[in-house]
Image (tube, grey):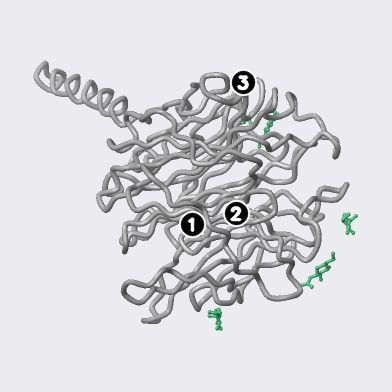
Amino acid sequence: MKLKEMQILIVLISMLIFVTRAIDSQFYTVFKPHDGKYPCYRQPAIVTTNQERTHLMVFAEGRFVTSCAPPLENRVERDNLPNEDGGLEMRRSEDSGSTWLSAQTVYTGNIDFYTVVWDSTSNTVYLMLQASSSVLLFISHDEGITWSDPTPLNVFPPPPFSKSIKSAVGHGIEVPFVCTNGSSHTGDNGSCPSCYACVLKSEMPEKNQNRQWNFTGIAQQYTRESQLVQTINMDAGTSHIYLNGRNFSPVPGHRYFARSTNGADQFTEFGIDSSLIEPVTKAWTGVVCSIERISINPSRILFSGPANATVRSNLTLRLSYDEAHSWSISRILYSGLSGYSDIAVVSDGKNVALVFENGEETFADRISVAIVPVSWIENNKKNDNKKL
Ligand SMILES: *[C@@H]1O[C@H](CO)[C@@H](O)[C@H](O)[C@H]1NC(C)=O
Ligand SMILES: *[C@@H]1O[C@H](CO)[C@@H](O)[C@H](O)[C@H]1NC(C)=O
Ligand SMILES: *[C@@H]1O[C@H](CO)[C@@H](O)[C@H](O)[C@H]1NC(C)=O
Ligand SMILES: *[C@@H]1O[C@H](CO)[C@@H](O)[C@H](O)[C@H]1NC(C)=O
Ligand SMILES: *[C@H]1O[C@@H](CO)[C@H](O)[C@@H](O)[C@@H]1NC(C)=O
């Protein structure tokens, strides 16, 4: 090789190294026990709140418990279930997740599940929070800086489902809920025969009208927390919806899905995706995972969840180019202990913001946000996992 060619090659190689580093993901710890008000933070959610998708809100549930999760995932005794007394905390970012403003308290009290959805047509954030036995609706017109006084969501699913409903965890489009015809707690074998993931839907309101909410599609038995994504179809005027849910069946370990061809009014196709593994640990059956569309053309849907059969670990991003029928790309974002996650697409679709529980002692020592270039997910050559 001539010297000149050699020099060009060296320049090219150093550029490649530079690019590999430059497109690497950025990690930020957004909720850390004892830093703030609570000794434990769990169940994170993330949404963008402006049209440019540069403003973000990240939420976590604070709990007054000394340990968020049992070390080594010991069996949680029924009488020792974590105390969920605490509240909902939120942090905002106005620069696509590079810096985070200090935490704001949205609600104080005993809470469990919550879902947050940003309505881009009216620049409104809807937060549905399960507080004690009712679901409270909070509305913000200024990206979460201020919130309306909460009002009880007084809509219920039809019989045989009970009025005891829970908003599912994470972000929504139409809002994922949990409906039950019995207890939503799992039996000794970890299954939940009374659990059905269901959808709370709102049609586009008339001008100056408030949104009306209504329970519609109900997924299969044994599904609980789920998330929804709109899929692309050729039938003009119809909206196809894909639901991906936690598996609480007597044979757990892989994610449930359901599909609707009429905007989640009904689900008509049901199944288990054997390529989407989810952990079944001594303490818990399955886990909360997230799903979100990155782009329409090309069609890309992203799924996040810990991909290990027995340990909440190896938080993995999977990409589908065929409307969530198959997952052609799988990339481990975080190889240590990791649990619940939620996805938002930021900065014109170049990056995704992923909020997730992770740690060394347990899967929920802290809650972090990773800003991940979509190009890093698609460039699936090697697994250069990050440790926080
Ligand atoms: C699992 O437990 C549930 C609730 O206790 C029960 O209804 C169901 O029959 C059990 N399933 C198996 C396979 O043991
Ligand atoms: C709820 O939605 C269903 C399905 O779209 C519809 O048939 C029903 O009339 C709606 N109910 C209310 C109270 O809006
Ligand atoms: C799951 O985690 C365990 C414990 O770290 C490990 O032994 C096992 O190989 C992992 N399985 C997979 C599929 O990654
Ligand atoms: C993570 O995944 C890698 C690759 O599949 C596997 O070798 C490793 O055992 C996994 N580790 C854990 C803790 O799940
Ligand atoms: C809800 O209850 C379980 C038993 O706990 C039954 O197996 C289900 O068939 C029932 N579901 C509905 C929709 O009634």
SS for callout 1: loop
* The N terminus lies in quadrant: top left
SS for callout 3: loop
Q: How many residues crowd mark 2 within 10 Å: few (<14), some (14–19), many (20+)?
A: many
Q: Relative to 324, does residue 354 appear above or below in the rendering?
A: above
Residue type at the position of mark 1: Gly
Q: Relative to 355, does residue 176 appear above or below in the rendering?
A: below
Q: Residue at x 47, y 61 (%)?
A: 229
Q: Position of residue 173 (x, y in %)?
A: 46, 61
Query: In front here: 383 or 218?
Result: 218
Query: In front here: 103 or 369?
Result: 103
The residues bearing labels 1 and 3 have C-alpha atoms spaced at a distance of 30 Å
In the image, which disc is placed on residue 360?
A: 3
The residues bearing labels 3 and 2 have C-alpha atoms spaced at a distance of 27 Å
| Residue 307 visible in rendering | yes
Q: Relative to 122, does residue 100 appear above or below in the rendering?
A: above
In the image, which disc is placed on residue 168?
A: 2
